């Protein structure tokens, strides 16, 4: 996309009262002394599009910039309308953008400011306005392509480096490092380098710890003057064989004792079974079960009769309690009825109210009729209440009669239930006595006549034979002999401990020396891999810098810095003819910035108006591929002066 600024009108913005640009898409040079407002033109353009100045500050909130003109006391001049309008061409499509900044005055007092926006004369909300411009071009990309210092001074070096690598595209892989690439196993070269460095650090530490340990073991060998220990060693071997034989005998006896204990547990279980069977025989009721069931049935019947009597008695008590409640309620109603009757008598016998209480004159007929009606209404109301209470009394009487009838019926039921209970008790007294006599005459089977009991007794006899004699005495004898042998062995081992230690130390020294050689070889292998990585990184860095710098006409980027240990570290520094960006003059920085913007514009396929501040510092040619607005400080020029330059004309020049 090619974006060109055709026209811009500025009114009351910062220090500019009124200024018009009519570029028609051409380049221009704006001249004036310092402080007249050259940079303000760029601020106005940015505020129109994004609501910020060239430093990225907004017109509101903390750290804001002051966009309104100030008076002598550095206070915003009141009564002004700030307006910026620009005609911008986007790939042949022309749009007009306009912003105004108004005071908000309430009852004669300034209460703040508001911003009004238009696109092609159509009013827009601030949010809609920003979204529309954001769809055309992002703010970050615009600043990157219109501010010559943005890339080198305002972006973090890592962000700059990422952009350059994106521009360079696919770099490829250095040749001749197949073994290293295969060892990466999905890791990056830097990750693999960290793995190797950690491995080397660990192996070096382990290797450095080996020599002191060997020296310590060797000093122990030098201090020991060995003697002939063959006789003691033979005796030790013989004692160890005897102890092993005793251990075997002890284990066998332990096994026998475990088997004996199992037989004892079996015997105890059989004796318990014998007692259980005898109890079962003594309690056998299979011959008299029918008699017991019949006796239990009689007792259950008697219990049912008793419960029936108790249930009827409980019901009678409940009805009697209900009658007492109804009687109490009826007594209360009759007392209230007596009061109602007295109230009615007093109201009916009261003299007629036919005299005016104020003048003592006879009341007129209409007033007499009204008073008489009130009297009749009151009597009717009293009579109504009396009727309601009479009804309550009648209801209580009816309820009492109902409960009394239920009590009579329940008394009949109680009499029948008592008769049935007594009949059952009489039957029980005779029949249970007969059943008890029949039960007492029944006998159980003696254990000696029971086949199951006889079988258990035979198993008990066999288990007693299998138990055998205890092996405790034999174990005690073996343990005593074993203790004596161990004591004798301990004395021999004490005498042979230094000789044994010497043999162990010699073996350990040989083991450590072998480990030391192994670690030395491993460290050498890792060093070779690390050297390969350094060579790989050096080759790859050259490829990256070559790919990146091949995109630029003048500027060269240093993307790697060499460390003291010979390694490389990422960086991103622009240079021109060997001069670092931080050491460049203002003109050189502008020249480098134009070269960078040209490449970025081509990469993003986007060209935007390029504002060149401090253009008077530049003696090198301007080789910009986009529309330029040069802000040129010129001594003696008291007003902003604009001269347009044909793009083709500048390129020819």
Image (cartoon, helix red, strand yellow):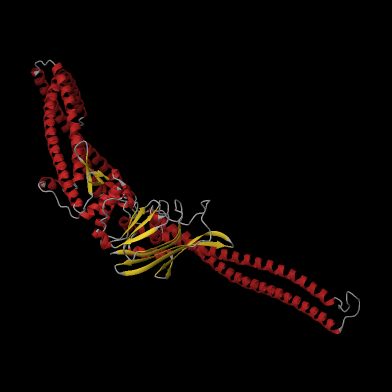
Q: Is residue 420 left or right of residue 533?
A: right
Which of these two is toward me, 339 or 427? Answer: 339
- Relative to 371, residue 602 above or below: above
Quadrant housing the C terminus: bottom left
554 or 289, which is in the foreground?
554
For this orientation, the residue located farthest to the front is: 636
The x, y position of residue 100, in whole percent, is 45, 63
Check the image and name the residue furthest to the right: 360
Residue 397 placement (x, y as % from top left): 67, 73
- What residue sits 11% from the left and 16% below the top? 226
Question: Which one is in front, 110 or 161?
Answer: 110
- The residue under the point 38% across, 61% down is 49
Q: Note whether 486 is above or below 77 in the view shown.
A: above
Q: Is residue 467 visible?
A: no
Q: Quadrant of residue 607?
A: bottom left
Residue 145 at x, y percent in the picture: 30, 57
Q: Residue at x 89, y 74 (%)?
A: 358
Is there any visible trace of residue 567 in the rendered image?
yes
How many numbered dots are placed on residues in this image? 0
Percent across and percent down for residue 217 are 16, 22
Displayed quadrant of residue 59: bottom left
Q: Is residue 412 left or right of residue 611?
A: right
Which of 264/346 is in front? 346
Name above or below for residue 241 compared with residue 72: above
Looking at the figure, which quarter contains the N terminus? bottom left
In this picture, is 161 found above or below 646?
A: above
């Amino acid at each position: 996309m090619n974006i060109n600024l055709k026209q811009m009108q500025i009114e009351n913005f910062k220090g500019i009262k009124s200024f018009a640009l009519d570029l028609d898409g051409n380049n221009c040079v704006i001249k004036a002394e310092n402080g007249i407002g050259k940079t303000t033109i760029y601020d106005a353009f940015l505020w129109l599009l994004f609501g910020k100045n060239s430093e990225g500050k907004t017109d509101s909130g903390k750290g804001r910039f002051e966009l309104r003109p100030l008076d002598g006391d550095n206070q915003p001049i009141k009564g002004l309308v700030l307006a910026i309008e620009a005609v911008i061409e986007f790939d042949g499509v022309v749009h007009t953008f306009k912003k105004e900044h108004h005071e908000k005055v309430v009852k004669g007092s300034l209460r703040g400011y508001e911003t009004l926006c238009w696109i092609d004369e159509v009013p827009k909300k601030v949010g809609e306005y920003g979204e529309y411009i954001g769809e055309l071009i992002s703010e970050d990309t615009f600043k990157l392509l219109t501010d010559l210092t943005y890339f080198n001074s305002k972006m973090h070096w890592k962000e700059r480096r990422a952009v350059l690598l994106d521009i360079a595209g696919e770099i490829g892989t250095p040749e001749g490092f197949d073994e290293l690439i295969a060892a990466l196993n999905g890791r990056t070269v830097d990750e693999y380098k960290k793995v190797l460095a950690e491995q080397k650090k660990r192996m070096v530490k382990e290797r450095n710890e080996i020599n002191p340990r060997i020296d310590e073991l060797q000093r122990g060998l030098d201090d020991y003057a060995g003697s002939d220990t063959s006789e003691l060693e033979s005796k030790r071997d013989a004692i160890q064989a005897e102890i092993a034989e005793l251990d075997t005998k002890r284990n066998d006896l332990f096994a026998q004792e475990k088997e004996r204990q199992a037989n004892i547990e079996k015997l105890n279980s059989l004796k318990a079974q014998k007692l259980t069977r005898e109890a079962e025989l003594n309690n056998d009721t299979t011959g008299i079960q029918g008699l017991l069931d019949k006796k239990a049935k009689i007792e259950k019947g008697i219990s049912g009769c008793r419960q029936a009597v108790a249930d009827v008695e409980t019901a009678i008590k409940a009805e009697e309690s209900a009658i007492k409640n109804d009687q109490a309620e009826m007594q209360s109603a009759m007392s209230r009825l007596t009061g109602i009757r007295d109230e009615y008598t007093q109201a009916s016998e009261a003299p007629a109210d036919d005299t005016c209480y104020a003048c003592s004159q006879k009341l007129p007929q209409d007033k007499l009729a009204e008073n008489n009606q009130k009297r009749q209404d009151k009597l009717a109301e009293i009579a109504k209440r009396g009727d309601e209470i009479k009804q309550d009394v009648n209801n209580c009487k009816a309820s009492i009669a109902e409960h009394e009838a239920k009590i009579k019926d329940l008394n009949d039921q109680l009499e029948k239930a008592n008769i049935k209970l007594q009949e059952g008790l009489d039957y029980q007294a005779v029949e249970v006595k007969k059943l008890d006599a029949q039960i007492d005459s029944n006998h159980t089977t003696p254990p000696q006549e029971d086949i199951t009991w006889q079988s258990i007794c035979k198993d008990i006899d066999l288990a007693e034979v299998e138990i055998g004699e205890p092996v405790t005495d034999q174990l005690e004898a073996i343990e005593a002999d074993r203790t004596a042998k161990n004591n004798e062995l301990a004395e021999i081992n004490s005498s042979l401990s230094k000789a044994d230690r010497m043999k162990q130390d010699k073996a350990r020294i040989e083991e450590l020396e072998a480990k030391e050689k192994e670690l030395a070889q491993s460290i050498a292998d890792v060093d070779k891999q690390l050297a390969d990585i350094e060579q790989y990184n050096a080759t790859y860095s050259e490829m990256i810098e070559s790919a990146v710098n091949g995109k630029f006409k003048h500027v060269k980027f240093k993307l790697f810095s060499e460390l003291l240990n010979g390694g490389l570290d990422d960086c991103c520094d622009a240079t021109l003819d060997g001069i670092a960006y931080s050491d460049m003059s203002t003109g050189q920085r502008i020249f480098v910035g134009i070269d960078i913007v040209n490449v970025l514009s081509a990469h993003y396929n986007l060209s935007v108006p390029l504002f060149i501040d401090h253009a008077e510092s530049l003696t090198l040619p301007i080789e910009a591929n986009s529309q330029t607005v040069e802000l040129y400080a010129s001594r003696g020029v008291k007003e902003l002066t604009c001269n347009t330059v044909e793009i083709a004309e500048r390129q020819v020049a």
